[in-house]
Image: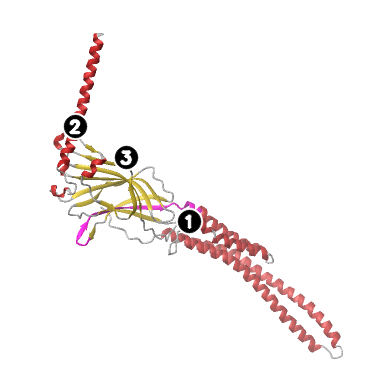
């Protein structure tokens, strides 16, 4: 019993010793922070304390998500903004503590580079369940700062090749109030890290290219960095919902070339339906509304033109046939009547005229029928020619279209790249 009592007392003493040690370490870190911030002025940059010149802010972006808008050219991005700089006033080499992890409430008491995003429209920090901020101080004065940001950024997209386009969107990070005499911003290596879970609905990220974009305002120079996101549009949706259906609609309009010329209702109905189908096709493809011509506009116009020409082809045959028959009726009737009147005798005038009219009527009907058959044959020749010309010319236009929009790339102004 006595042995158990002694064992319990020993364990209690040991636990108290450990708690005292932990409390001592906590007290030591707290004293270090209090000592560092006692004479610290967060309004002044650490430039004056550095002998090597301005503060160098090393930046890295860890991209969590990237999404584009269907209605505008903006894109939304969520990322960790990671920064690293040195503030000699925060050095604590003799403290024996490897790293000081400050609470987010203490960050307001420390100097932070005043950087901002040039092409940002809206942005916010994440505060659930606490502000997503990390602030570590190393013994030599190096500071590691990370914050989670989500924002919407402008992107000047060139949609002349839409939907076969490759877009370049960028973000720029610049110092707002401190010139290069006090602060320089540069990329870390690697500058941008992409999460493996990034999936975009319209684009595929081909590559990221960092660049330097230092700016001069008035007589001062300000540090600036940026990164280009090269985005390739995934156009499978457009092939399924636009290109393939429009090709089928154009081919459907060619069926009228195989229908009989007398099938007026069928050929006109088919032509009107195909034209209406092409005009309503754009409503289901998410066409971008811009003031210049896109590849999709060219494709739609060409397809609509081929469908419309199919209707015009039958209208030409129909009008030309009816016009020729009417002209033949008038010419043959007048010629036959004049000839019979000149050859008739005065005594047998009444009988001859009545008999002559009957013969004129019979001859006119025979000649009209022969002319009608001839015009139908001519119309069928036009149909047979259209069966060959329309597909060949449509294939030729397709070859030109895909050759141009596959090889051609719009000229874009690229910023200065980092080396």
Residue wearing tag 2: 27
Which percent across, then down, holds residue 63? 34, 46
> Going 51% across and 55% down the picture, which residue do you hit?
284
Q: Is residue 345 left or right of residue 46?
A: right
Q: Is residue 199 left or right of residue 35?
A: right
> First in sequence: mark 1 or mark 3?
3
> First in sequence: mark 1 or mark 2?
2
Q: CA distance from mark 2 to mark 3?
A: 24 Å
Residue wearing tag 1: 286
Q: Nearer the viewer, residue 53 or 348?
A: 53
Q: CA distance from mark 1 to mark 2?
A: 62 Å
Residue 249, relative to residue 25: is it above or below?
A: below
> Going 25% across and 41% down the picture, which residue do you hit?
105
The label nearer to you, 1 versus 2, is 2
Q: Mark yes or no: residue 309 visible.
A: yes
Q: Are marks 1 and 3 in contact (CB under 8 Å)?
A: no
> Going 19% across and 54% down the picture, which residue do you hit?
180
Residue 349, relative to residue 144: is it above or below?
A: below
């Amino acid at each position: 019993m006595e042995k158990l009592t002694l064992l319990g007392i020993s364990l209690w003493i040991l636990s108290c010793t450990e708690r005292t040690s932990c409390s001592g370490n906590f007290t030591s870190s707290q004293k270090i922070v209090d000592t560092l911030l006692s004479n610290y002025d967060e309004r002044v940059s650490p430039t004056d304390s550095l002998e090597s010149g301005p503060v160098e802010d090393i930046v890295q972006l860890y991209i969590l998500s990237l999404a584009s808008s269907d209605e505008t050219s903006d894109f939304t991005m969520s990322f960790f903004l990671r920064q690293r700089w040195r503030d000699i006033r925060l050095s604590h080499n003799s403290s024996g503590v490897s790293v000081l992890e400050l609470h987010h409430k203490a960050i307001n008491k420390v100097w932070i580079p005043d950087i901002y995003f040039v092409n940002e429209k809206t942005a916010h920090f994440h505060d659930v369940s606490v502000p997503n901020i990390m602030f570590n101080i190393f013994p030599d004065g190096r500071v590691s700062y990370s914050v989670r940001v989500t924002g919407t950024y402008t992107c000047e997209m060139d949609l002349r090749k839409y939907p076969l386009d490759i877009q370049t969107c960028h973000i720029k990070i610049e110092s707002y109030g401190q010139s290069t005499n006090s602060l320089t911003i540069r990329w870390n290596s690697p500058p941008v890290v992409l999460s493996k879970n990034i999936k975009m609905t319209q684009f595929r990220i081909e590559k990221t290219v960092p660049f330097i974009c230092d700016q001069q305002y008035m007589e001062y120079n300000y540090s600036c960095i940026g990164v280009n996101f090269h985005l390739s549009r995934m156009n499978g949706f457009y092939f399924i919902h636009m290109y393939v259906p429009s090709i089928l609609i154009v081919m459907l309009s060619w069926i009228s070339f195989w229908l009989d010329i007398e099938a007026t209702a069928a050929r006109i109905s088919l032509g009107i339906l195909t034209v209406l189908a092409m005009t309503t096709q754009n409503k289901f493809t998410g066409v971008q509304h811009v003031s210049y011509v896109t590849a999709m506009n060219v494709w739609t116009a060409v397809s609509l033109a081929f469908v419309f020409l199919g209707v015009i082809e039958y209208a030409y045959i129909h009008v030309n046939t009816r016009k020729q028959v009417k002209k033949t009726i008038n010419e043959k009737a007048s010629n036959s009547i004049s000839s019979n009147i000149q050859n008739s005798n005065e005594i047998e005038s009444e009988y001859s005229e009545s008999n002559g009219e009957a013969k004129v009527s019979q001859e006119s009907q025979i000649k009209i029928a022969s002319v009608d058959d001839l015009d139908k044959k001519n119309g069928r020749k036009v149909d047979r020619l259209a069966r060959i010309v329309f597909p060949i010319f449509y294939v030729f236009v397709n070859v030109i279209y895909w050759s141009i929009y596959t090889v051609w790339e719009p000229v874009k102004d690229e910023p200065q790249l980092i080396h």
